[in-house]
Image: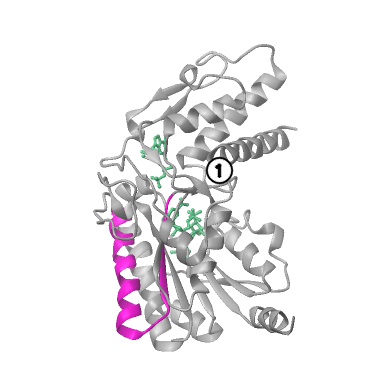
C-alpha cells in the first residue's frame, strides 16, 4: 500500500510536453496523461482559425496548459523546453499526410525532420534529463516484400513523408547512443479513431457512409449514385494497412517511456486489411454495397505508394506487455457511428 502511494505521488510530480496536441494522437495522449495525474503542456501553433476542436473538452483542466510555438523554430523549442524542464516530451507534431508530402516536400522535411532535430538539440543543451518520444511510422518500411514488419525489417521509405521520418527516426537512435538521452521511437502502424483527420482514407469512408445513412433517414429507399448522392472518389483501394485505434497507441507510447532503458518498438495489431475490406465493413454497417457508390479517381493515386503494411508487435508484447484492445470491426463501427452522430447534429 505504501509503495503504491509513493508510485502515485511520483506520477503526480511528472510533467509532460506534447507537440501535436491538437491532432488525433496528441488529444488522446493528453487525456491519458491528465488521467494519470501529469501536468501537461500542449504545444499549439498560431493559426488564423480555431484548431482546438479535439481538445476543447479538457482545455480548462487545471493540469493542462497550452503553449504557443512551432517545432520548426529552434529558438522557440529551446525556450519552451528549457523553461518547462519536462520529465517526458512526446513529439507527435508532423505534416502527417503521405499524399500531401509529394506536393509539399520541403515543408514536410522542415516539420518532420528538422522539427525533431530542434527538439533533440533543445533537450541536449537545456534539459538533458527529459525523456523523448518520437512518432515514427510503419511508412519507414516502404513498399516492402517482407511481411510482417518488425523493428529489424529493412527500411526503404517511399514518400517524402517517410524519408523525413526516417531522418528523425535515425536521429532519435543517434542521440540515445551519442549523448545518453532517454530517447524512444515508436514505429506505429496506421491508427484511426473518430478524431482521425478527414483526408485519411478511413475517415473519408466513414464520413461518406454516415451521409448515406442520413439520406436514408429522410428518404424512402436506397440512395442512387450520381442521382441522389455524389460518388465516393478514391484511389488505390487494393492497399493493405494494419489499422488500430489511436487510444491503444497512446497507451503504448507512454509504456515505452516508463521502461528502464530507452528503445524502439513496433506497435500495431498484427492484422492487415485492404481499403476494400474497410469499405466492405463500413458500408456493411448500413446494409449497402460499397461497389454501388465508389468511383476511382486517378487524382487520389500517389506517385509511389506502399501496398502492404502488417505489424509484428511481438517485441512490444514481450517487453512492454502491450497489445491492442480494440479490433478492426469495432474500430469501423465506432467511426461510422460517430460520424453519423455528427451528421445528425449539424443538420438539426
Ligand atoms: P495529426 O495530423 O492528427 O496531428 C498532427 C499535429 O501536428 C497537429 O496538432 C498539428 O497542428 C501539429 N503540427 C503540424 N506542424 C506543426 C508545427 N510546425 N509545429 C507545431 N505543431 C505542428 O497526426 P496524428 O495525430 O494522426 O499523428 C501523430 C504523429 O504520429 C504524427 O507525427 C504522425 O506522422 C505520426 N504517425 C501517425 C500515424 C497514424 O496512423 N495516425 C501512424 C504513424 C505515425 P495543427 O492542428 O495546427 O495542424
Ligand atoms: P497512410 O497509410 O498514412 O498513407 O494513410 P491513408 O489513409 O492516407 O492511406 C492509406 C491507403 O489508402 C494508401 O495506400 C492510399 O493510397 C489509399 N487510398 C486510396 N484512396 C485514398 C483516398 O482517397 N485518400 C487517401 N488518403 N488514401 C487513399
169 magenta-colored? yes
Q: Name which quarter of the figure residue 274 lies in.
A: top left
Where the N terminus falls, by quadrant? bottom right
- State left or right for residue 234 relative to residue 326: left
Residue 268 in view in this figure: yes
Q: Which residues are magenta?
A: 160-189
Q: Residue at x 50, y 72 (%)?
A: 257
- Whether residue 330 sits left or right of residue 297 in the image: it is right
Instruction: Describe the element under mark 1 as helix, strand or loop.
Output: loop
Image vertical order of residue 193 relative to residue 227, above or below: below
Residue 51 painted magenta: no
Up the image or down, 255 lies above or below 142; here it is below
Magenta part mainly helix, strand or loop? helix
**Colour treatment of the image:** one colour
Front residue of 5 and 234: 5
Q: Nearer the viewer, residue 142 or 267?
A: 267
Report the front residue among 44 and 305. 305
Residue 45: in sight, yes or no? no
Q: Residue at x 38, y 75 (%)?
A: 118
Q: Residue at x 63, y 53 (%)?
A: 53
Q: Nearer the viewer, residue 233 or 86?
A: 86
Q: Is residue 274 above or below residue 163?
A: above
Q: Position of residue 327 (x, y in %)?
A: 55, 43
For label 1, the residue is 327
Q: Position of residue 47 (x, y in %)?
A: 53, 60
Q: Quadrant of residue 295?
A: top left
**If the picture is divided into quarters, which one holds ligand 2?**
top left
Q: Mark 1 Cα within 10 Å, few/some/many (few <14, many 20+)?
A: few
What is the x, y in percent for residue 318?
A: 46, 62
Task: Give percent across and percent down for residue 289.
Answer: 52, 19
Amino acid at each position: 500500500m505504501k509503495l503504491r502511494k509513493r508510485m502515485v505521488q511520483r506520477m503526480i510530480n511528472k510533467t509532460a510536453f506534447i507537440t501535436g496536441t491538437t491532432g488525433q494522437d496528441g488529444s488522446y495522449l493528453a487525456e491519458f496523461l491528465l488521467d494519470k495525474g501529469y501536468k501537461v503542456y500542449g504545444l499549439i501553433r498560431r493559426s488564423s482559425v480555431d484548431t482546438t476542436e479535439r481538445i476543447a473538452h479538457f482545455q480548462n483542466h487545471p493540469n493542462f496548459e497550452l503553449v504557443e510555438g512551432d517545432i520548426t523554430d529552434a529558438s522557440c523549442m529551446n525556450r519552451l523546453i528549457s523553461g518547462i524542464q519536462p520529465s517526458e516530451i512526446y513529439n507527435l507534431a508532423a505534416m502527417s499526410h503521405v499524399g500531401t508530402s509529394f506536393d509539399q516536400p520541403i515543408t514536410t522535411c522542415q516539420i518532420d525532420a528538422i522539427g525533431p532535430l530542434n527538439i533533440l538539440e533543445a533537450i541536449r543543451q537545456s534539459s538533458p534529463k527529459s525523456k523523448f518520444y518520437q512518432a515514427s511510422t510503419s511508412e519507414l518500411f516502404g513498399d516492402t516484400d517482407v511481411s510482417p514488419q518488425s523493428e529489424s525489417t529493412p527500411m526503404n521509405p517511399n514518400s517524402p513523408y517517410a524519408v523525413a521520418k526516417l531522418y528523425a527516426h535515425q536521429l532519435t537512435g543517434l542521440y540515445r547512443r551519442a549523448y545518453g538521452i532517454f530517447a524512444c521511437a515508436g514505429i506505429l502502424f496506421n491508427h484511426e479513431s473518430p478524431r482521425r483527420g478527414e483526408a485519411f482514407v478511413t475517415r473519408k469512408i466513414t464520413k461518406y457512409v454516415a451521409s448515406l445513412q442520413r439520406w436514408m433517414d429522410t428518404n424512402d429507399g436506397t440512395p442512387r449514385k450520381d442521382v441522389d448522392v455524389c460518388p465516393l472518389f478514391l484511389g488505390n483501394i487494393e492497399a493493405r494497412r494494419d489499422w488500430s485505434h489511436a487510444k491503444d497507441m497512446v497507451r503504448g507510447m507512454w509504456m515505452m517511456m516508463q521502461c528502464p532503458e530507452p528503445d524502439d518498438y513496433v506497435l500495431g495489431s498484427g492484422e492487415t486489411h485492404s481499403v476494400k475490406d474497410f469499405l466492405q465493413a463500413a458500408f456493411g454497417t448500413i446494409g449497402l454495397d460499397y461497389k454501388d457508390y465508389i468511383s476511382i479517381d486517378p487524382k487520389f493515386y500517389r506517385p509511389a505508394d506502399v501496398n502492404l503494411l502488417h505489424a509484428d508487435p511481438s517485441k512490444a508484447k514481450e517487453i512492454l506487455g502491450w497489445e491492442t484492445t480494440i479490433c478492426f470491426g469495432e474500430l469501423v463501427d465506432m467511426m461510422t457511428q460517430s460520424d453519423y452522430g455528427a451528421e445528425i447534429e449539424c443538420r438539426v
